[in-house]
């Protein structure tokens, strides 16, 4: 019953924040302008991430105060979460150079690896004999950057990232049998309220503050789940759930890198935005944002069914 209370609380709080902000045109200086690469045709407020962050903050504080539950390393998690949100917020306002953005991501992720125990103490079984602290640090850093930016890359169509994130979070909720499930309910409730305004044609966007925040939470959830499992392949399930953003990011990087150009310029091409993403490929075939979101969500839905069968079958 408490799960439903937290889900509905975050839903209605986020819904109220969006309605109030949209009606009073608050933060409307943070906009996503149309371009040749983008599908929308008019300036759209990129304020979803800000409002979801506020809703999560209030609901989580209420959850901690009244249920008297405290997660290990909570202060460090909050600190790094605030940093990643601030980076996205500044990027939404100033449109940061991609190299600065990546540099700050590396710094934030490095801080998290060093300060958060369930990340710092995780050892990657794929490293085998070289499972030293240095190799684990680098591998964890690489994993975090892939997921955070892979999620960010998926925020290209109305309703796509919010829908995929909801399915991913439900998949994670099936794996967990801890108090962390309350946090899933809070985040899912916020995303459901946001989806009401982000479905095609979208009235508001997540912005980088939202997409980086979602990617960051999925990283934290993955490491926390792996820390609770004693088997060597403890990261298998999180990697399965996050397969779509991983495939999309690696596919786009390879396509951009192998574009005919001078060798050094190929590295720069990796960071130049284009329409090579999987969702754009599907959109070109379907000519429908709704059907594209449906097909991509179906991929994660099959993974969800697999997790249900494995855990409850």
Image (tube, rainbow, N blue to C red):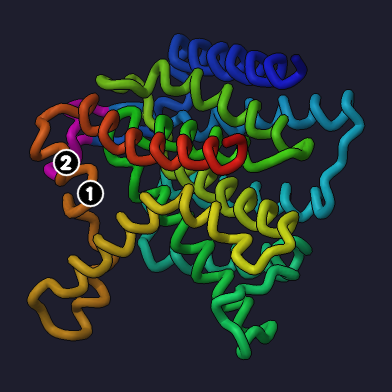
The secondary structure type at the circle numbered 1 is: helix
Which residue is pictured at 56% across the width and 70% down the height? Answer: 141
Residue 282 - label: 2
Query: What range of the chain is rendered magenta?
Result: 34-43
The residue where tag 1 is placed is: 278
Q: Main secondary structure of the magenta part?
A: loop
Neighbourhood count class around disc 2 (C-alpha, 10 Å): few under 14, some 14–19, many 20 upward: some
In the image, residue 287 above or below residue 72: above
Relative side of 198 to 83, left or right: left
Q: For marks 2 and 1, give the CA distance.
A: 6 Å
Q: Position of residue 250 (x, y in %)?
A: 31, 64
The secondary structure type at the circle numbered 2 is: helix
In the image, residue 28 above or below residue 74: above
**In-front residue for pair 86/176:** 176
Q: Position of residue 276 (x, y in %)?
A: 18, 54
Task: Tell me if label 2 and label 1 are in contact, CB under 8 Å.
Answer: yes
Q: Position of residue 199 (x, y in %)?
A: 33, 21
Q: Tell me, yes or no, if residue 86 can be seen here.
A: no
Which residue is pictured at 52% across the width and 11% down the height? Answer: 20
In the image, residue 109 above or below residue 136: above
Relative side of 282 to 260, left or right: right
Which residue is pictured at 61% across the width and 73% down the height? Answer: 124
Relative side of 146 to 20, left or right: left
């Amino acid at each position: 019953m408490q799960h439903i209370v937290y889900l509905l609380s975050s839903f209605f709080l986020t819904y109220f924040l969006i309605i109030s902000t949209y009606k009073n045109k608050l933060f409307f200086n943070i906009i996503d302008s149309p371009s040749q690469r983008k599908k929308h045709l008019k300036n759209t407020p990129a304020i979803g991430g800000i409002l979801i962050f506020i809703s999560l903050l209030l609901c989580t504080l209420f959850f901690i105060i009244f249920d008297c539950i405290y997660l290990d390393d909570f202060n460090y998690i909050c600190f790094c979460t605030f940093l990643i949100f601030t980076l996205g917020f500044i990027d939404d306002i100033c449109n940061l150079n991609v190299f600065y953005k990546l540099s700050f991501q590396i710094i934030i992720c490095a801080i998290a690896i060093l300060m958060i125990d369930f990340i710092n103490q995780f050892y990657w079984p794929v490293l085998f004999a070289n499972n030293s602290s240095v190799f684990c640090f680098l591998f964890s850093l690489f994993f975090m950057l892939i997921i955070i930016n892979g999620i960010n890359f998926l925020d290209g169509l109305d309703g796509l990232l919010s829908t995929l994130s909801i399915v991913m979070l439900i998949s994670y909720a099936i794996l967990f049998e801890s108090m962390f499930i309350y946090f899933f309910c809070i985040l899912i409730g916020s995303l459901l309220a946001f989806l009401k305004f982000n479905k095609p044609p979208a009235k508001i966007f997540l912005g980088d503050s939202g997409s980086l925040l979602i990617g960051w939470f999925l990283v934290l959830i993955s490491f926390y789940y792996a820390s609770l499992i004693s088997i060597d392949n403890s990261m298998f399930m999180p990697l399965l759930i996050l397969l779509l953003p991983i495939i999309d990011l690696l596919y786009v990087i390879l396509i951009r890198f192998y574009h005919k150009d001078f060798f050094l310029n190929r590295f720069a091409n990796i960071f130049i935005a284009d329409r090579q993403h999987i969702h754009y490929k599907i959109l070109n075939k379907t000519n429908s944002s709704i059907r594209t979101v449906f097909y991509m969500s179906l991929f994660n839905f099959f993974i969800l069914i697999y997790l249900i069968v494995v855990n409850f079958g």
